Image (tube, rainbow, N blue to C red):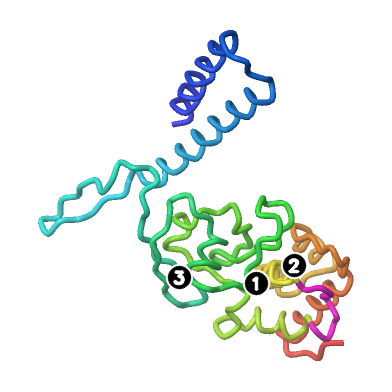
């Protein structure tokens, strides 16, 4: 798939190069054109990979191809916070966008939308992931948990309960991501050390800088989950 995409990009780029001598094409215009071609080809390849196996079953049990269009809308079914959601989306749709725009689960934020800040962190099968670069179609068949899932997850509920008294947030915009990262940590390590907590939360940036208070909140949540009294 990658080889086909590269060949397509090189063919278009070669055509552009041949036209440079006959037309007034600036270096900036040329670079923008070739970059745009590569981007479109890359997205097309990713979408084609996601939809090339889209099939439908007939009453006789045979399967047929639904569509050869790599950008054709596809139906998906996701399990989020223990509930089933369905939507029809583009195969390139990212999980954060589907959660927010299709399912109205807006607790998950997308501050940078390029896998740098961690504010979009959710859990997939108990593991913290950046939902802004995770294809929604890939999430099918997995258990997704967002910051709204307190009723289904006592660990998440404990983290949220500990967060406010510890003053672990100021503006609060990145907090859903930090809370989900903390929840994933406590699921895998119920009694983390300070270094464990730092490692568990390091993928989520906080512009307000309330990192120390976040550590306290996770410690208090861990204590509460073990039946103790938080400080």
Q: Is residue 171 magenta?
A: yes
**Label 2 vs 1, first from the N-terminus:** 2
On the image, the x and y values in percent for residue 39 come to: 55, 35
Label of residue 174 in the image: 2
Q: CA distance from mark 2 to mark 1?
A: 20 Å
Q: Which x, y percent locates residue 210?
A: 87, 70
- Residue 99 lies, in percent from the top left, at 53, 67
- Residue 33 position by quadrant: top right
133 over 228 or under it: above or below: above
Asked whether disc 3 touches disc 1, contact meaning CB atoms under 8 Å apart, the reply is: no
Q: Is residue 118 left or right of residue 79?
A: right
Q: Quadrant of the C terminus?
A: bottom right
> Magenta residues?
164-172
Residue drawn where x is 70% and y is 63% of the image = 119
- Mark 2 or 1, which is nearer the eye? 2
Q: Residue at x 47, y 28 (%)?
A: 5
Query: Quarter holding the N terminus?
Result: top left
The residues bearing labels 3 and 2 have C-alpha atoms spaced at a distance of: 24 Å
């Amino acid at each position: 798939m990658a080889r086909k995409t590269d060949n397509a990009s090189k063919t278009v780029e070669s055509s552009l190069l041949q036209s440079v001598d006959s037309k007034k094409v600036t270096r900036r215009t040329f670079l923008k054109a070739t970059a745009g071609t590569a981007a479109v080809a890359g997205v097309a390849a990713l979408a084609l990979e996601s939809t090339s196996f889209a099939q439908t079953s007939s009453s006789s049990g045979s399967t047929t191809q639904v569509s050869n269009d790599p950008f054709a809308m596809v139906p998906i079914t996701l399990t989020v916070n223990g509930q089933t959601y369905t939507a029809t989306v583009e195969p390139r749709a990212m999980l954060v966008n589907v959660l927010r725009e299709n399912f109205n689960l807006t607790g998950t934020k997308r501050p940078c939308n390029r896998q740098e800040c961690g504010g979009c962190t959710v859990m997939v099968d108990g593991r913290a992931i950046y939902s802004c670069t995770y294809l929604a179609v890939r999430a099918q068949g997995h258990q997704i948990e967002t910051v709204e899932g307190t009723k289904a997850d006592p660990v998440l509920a404990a983290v949220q309960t500990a967060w406010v008294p510890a003053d672990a947030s100021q503006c609060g915009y990145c907090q859903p991501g930090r809370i989900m990262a903390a929840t994933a940590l406590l699921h895998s390590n119920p009694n983390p050390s300070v270094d464990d907590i730092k490692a568990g939360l390091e993928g989520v940036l906080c512009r307000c800088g309330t990192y120390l208070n976040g550590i306290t909140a996770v410690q208090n949540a861990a204590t509460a989950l073990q039946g103790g009294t938080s400080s």
